[in-house]
Amino acid sequence: MKKVVILSGAGMSAESGISTFRDAGGLWDQYPVEQVATPEGWIRDPQLVTRFYNERRKQLLEVKPNRGHELVAALEKEFDVTVVTQNIDNLHERAGSSHVIHLHGELTKVCSSRDPQNPHYIKKLKPKEYEVKIGDKAGDGSQLRPFIVWFGEAVPEIETAIRYVEQADIFIIIGTSLNVYPAAGLLHYVPAEADVYLIDPKPVDTHSRRPVHVIQKGASEGMEELLKIIS
Ligand code: APR
């Protein structure tokens, strides 16, 4: 089976009703990124940060995977598929993708604020636990924090992602502005002989001279078109 690696970003979930970050009216227009997505923001106002991610979790219960997620999941019938996502939602999994690497963490998980990457203290929340409160403690007695990779923090999953990208026969980029590293640099690890596709309604700078087959459409329509080419 050919190996397919997908790199997805916020645009993947846009048709499910989740805002992207950098489009007009996107999440970073509504909330200052330094307040809700940095370690400094967390130290300054954990209450605000906790509330921000509680709202994001509540939204998870209201949205569902779109046709794009479903078509990505359906690729598993024909290909050996790894999804590398920058998204913190769980829509790829809910659409049926069985191998998803979350580079920037997961909304459905919380961790220790003293030792965020310690697997002993990473906990998966049940939907009824989605509202985390100040005072809720991790196993080490520290305040629970969202299991999210904030700006300025290491991206531990990048090494695993690189291992899969290096083996790809087909690499598909969907709905990311490729502004944030190290995710944006994954294209450099794709083997020279692999085919690269990019699905996005807007032009995206890949920061690479490598030929890319651009499908300038939204995730669902773009995936339909891609399937006609690769299957
Ligand atoms: N289908 C596909 N792509 C879309 C759609 C759609 N329906 N609508 C918008 N897009 C595209 C936009 O054109 C843009 O290129 O999705 C991309 C979203 O880009 P960003 O908002 O920058 O999101 P992303 O690239 O995922 O951001 C990366 O930055 O803020 C951090 O940690 C956060 O994971 C995030 C990272």
Image (tube, helix red, strand yellow):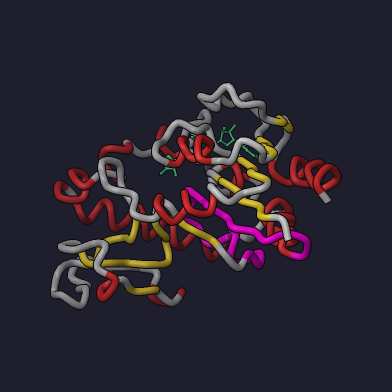
Residue 199 seen from this side: no
User: Where does the image place residue 39, in percent across and percent down from the top left?
Assistant: 21, 47
Left of 163 or right of it: where is 64?
right
Q: Quadrant of residue 138?
A: bottom left
Q: State the extent of the magenta-drawn residues as a range.
A: 77-97
Left of 3 or right of it: where is 101?
left
Position above or below: 226 against 213 = below
User: Where does the image place residue 198, in percent across and percent down from the top left?
Assistant: 66, 35
User: Where does the image place residue 161, in percent across and percent down from the top left?
Assistant: 47, 52
Residue displayed at 80% across by 46% down: 230
Residue displayed at 20% across by 54% down: 46
Residue 166 seen from this side: yes
State the residue in front, 129 or 105: 105
Left of 225 or right of it: where is 187?
left
Is 83 inside the magenta-drawn segment? Answer: yes
The quarter in which the N terminus is drawn is: bottom right
Is 79 inside the magenta-drawn segment? Answer: yes
Residue displayed at 22% across by 56% down: 47
User: Where does the image place residue 59, in percent across and percent down from the top left?
Assistant: 50, 58
Left of 50 or right of it: where is 142?
left
